[in-house]
Amino acid sequence: MVRKKIHYLLPILIAILIFISNFLNTQLFGSEIVNFAVWFILSLFIFAAGWINNLAFSWGKGGKVIVAVIVATSIISVMFISFFSDYFHTENLLFENLILYSSRNILLGTMAIFGMSVCELLIVQRENESLKK
């Protein structure tokens, strides 16, 4: 019972990590390597959360959960950015920024789906190896 409740915290963790990416401003970092490192580490965390999500929910249900998290996080981010555009220093048009931040959310969400697919691929390969023997 306790384990099931912990599994439902995984989509919340993925949503929080995706939402945190909205606050990463590329102008904060002076070096491109540091900027890449921050995004790489964030992508690794979301990849690992997607991997664990596949172990917890299986491929079918976990995929639906991740897609729902991507859509919900994108909608919340769009509303957040449109209401607090002064904080995000949006000099461009609002529509361009909505596309930019939504694509960030979708990119990180696909990292979770990629983690799920790699996990599922390894599970299927182990099953095939055991069937060959």
Image (tube, rainbow, N blue to C red):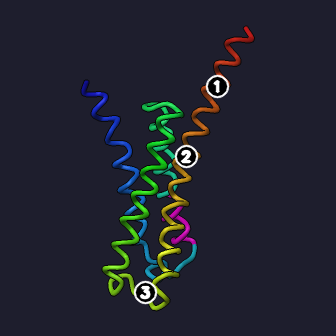
**Residue hosting label 3:** 90
Query: Residue 29, relative to residue 120: is it above or below?
Result: below
In the rendering, at what x and y percent does residue 95 appear? Answer: 49, 81
In the rendering, at what x and y percent does residue 23 appear? Answer: 38, 72
- Helix, strand or loop at label 3? It is loop
- Helix, strand or loop at label 2? It is helix
Residue type highlighted by circle 1: Val
Q: Which mark is residue 124?
A: 1
Query: Residue 48, relative to residue 18: is it above or below?
Result: above
**Residue hosting label 2:** 113
Q: Which mark is residue 111?
A: none
- Helix, strand or loop at label 1? It is helix
In the rendering, at what x and y percent does residue 113 appear? Answer: 55, 46
Residue type highlighted by circle 3: Thr
Outermost residue, right direction? 132
What residue range appears in magenta? 33-41
Residue at coordinates 49% horizontally, 78% vertically from top-left? 26
Determine the main secondary structure of the stretch shown in magenta.
Answer: helix
